[in-house]
């Protein structure tokens, strides 16, 4: 092979190219693209070997490759190699070569197609994939470590996804563990009335409605009424079509108990205020009136004796009202302790 008549294919090739002597690895000829990409002048290139183009950690790998390299009669693809230019930038070059005679020496011509951007994109894609896997794992752990129940169904009512809390709850209520692909609205562990009601819930969401319900049931273990706040959300495809329903259920039994206790407590306070304002005000007003008509200058005035008798009667009335208030307070507190956890 001769470069005399085809030098323009070498000199003006848009890919970096060079010729090196096989025995010494000394670079004998270099094209313009290599000078531009690697930042060395032509004189600097011709004073170098191909080893000088590689980072220190890559030299041993290159030496081992040269020993094991299989010689081909046609173009030899050597893979992608890590090079380094004059200013220290790393270049990933896809190497194709061919043996030839140049100036009477056994040489090799190399085409170093720059693969830096392609490999960078591939590495970034791998990193993005790893990040997505990590995010998915973290999200999965978060979803499965909550006591809130999360599940989704498709348009046929089949389970698409369910977290551990939901799976455990359904198993506890029905004695049968649900699995992805099962019909959620045809579960053998549910009665016909329950299945009909849940079909209606799903249909509302499949029609595009976002809503929340309060669902009550009997805990199979404690036999107590438990309440769940359940939200239903349509799941949309990119084209706007609804493909299923996402559901989120939270146990609000204790919250409802607390809310009822607060309502009862407010009612108790209103009753106490009513007793205080109505039942207590009358005897207190009588007491004040009696005190005002007493002869305070002559305490031994015979008329005072009758007033004192009336004051004693009024005092007993006040005592009865106070006792009634105390009794109501104790009763309501006992009720409150029963309602609160």
Image (cartoon, rainbow, N blue to C red):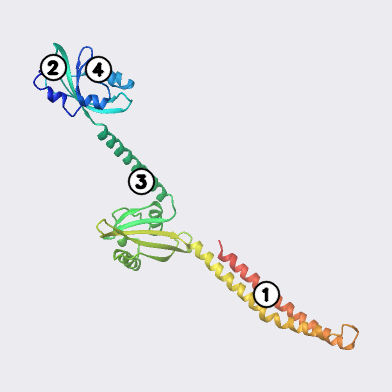
Task: Please identify, in this view, whether the residue under mark 4 or under mark 1 is nearer the observer.
Answer: 4
The residue at which mark 1 appears reads as 325
Q: Residues within 10 Å of mark 4 (few under 14, many from 20)?
A: few
Residue 133 pos. (x, y %): 34, 42
**Sooner in the amino-acid sequence: mark 4 or mark 1:** 4
The residue at which mark 2 appears reads as 100
Residue at figure coordinates x 10%, y 22% from the top left: 6
Q: Are marks 4 and 2 in contact (CB under 8 Å)?
A: no
Query: In this rendering, is residue 265 above or below 179?
Result: below
Quadrant of the snapshot with the C terminus? bottom right
Left or right of 94 on screen, residue 227? right
Query: Which label number is shown at residue 43?
Result: 4
Circle 1 — which element?
helix
**Sooner in the amino-acid sequence: mark 4 or mark 3:** 4
The residue at which mark 3 appears reads as 136
**Sooner in the amino-acid sequence: mark 3 or mark 2:** 2
Circle 4 — which element?
helix
């Amino acid at each position: 092979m001769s470069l005399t008549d085809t030098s323009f294919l070498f000199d003006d090739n848009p890919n970096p190219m060079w010729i090196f002597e096989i025995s010494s690895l000394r670079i004998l000829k270099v094209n313009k693209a290599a000078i531009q990409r690697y930042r060395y002048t032509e004189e600097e290139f011709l004073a170098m070997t191909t080893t000088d183009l590689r980072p220190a950690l890559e030299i041993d790998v290159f030496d081992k490759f040269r020993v094991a390299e299989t010689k081909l009669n046609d173009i030899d693809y050597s893979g992608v190699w890590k090079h380094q230019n004059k200013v220290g930038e790393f270049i990933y070059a896809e190497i194709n070569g061919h043996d030839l005679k140049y100036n009477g020496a056994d040489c090799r011509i190399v085409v170093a197609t720059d693969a830096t951007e392609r490999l960078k994109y591939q590495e970034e894609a791998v990193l993005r994939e790893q990040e997505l896997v990590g995010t998915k794992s973290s999200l999965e752990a978060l979803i499965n470590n909550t006591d809130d129940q999360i599940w989704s169904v498709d348009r046929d009512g089949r389970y698409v996804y369910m977290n551990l809390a939901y799976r455990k709850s359904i198993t506890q209520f029905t004695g049968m563990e649900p699995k992805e692909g099962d019909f959620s609205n045809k579960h053998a562990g549910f009665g016909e009335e329950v299945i009909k009601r849940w079909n209606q819930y799903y249909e509302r969401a499949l029609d595009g409605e976002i809503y929340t319900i309060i669902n009550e049931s009997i805990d199979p273990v404690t036999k107590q009424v438990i309440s769940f706040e359940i939200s239903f959300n349509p799941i949309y495809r990119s084209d706007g079509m609804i493909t299923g329903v996402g559901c989120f259920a939270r146990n609000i039994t204790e919250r409802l108990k607390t809310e009822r206790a607060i309502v009862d407590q407010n009612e108790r306070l209103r009753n106490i205020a009513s007793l205080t304002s109505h039942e207590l005000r009358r005897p207190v007003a009588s007491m004040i009136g009696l005190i005002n008509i007493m002869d305070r200058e002559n305490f031994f005035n015979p008329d005072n004796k009758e007033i004192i008798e009336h004051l004693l009667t009024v005092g007993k009335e006040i005592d009865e009202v106070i006792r009634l208030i105390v009794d109501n307070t104790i009763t309501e507190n006992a009720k409150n302790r029963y309602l609160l956890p």
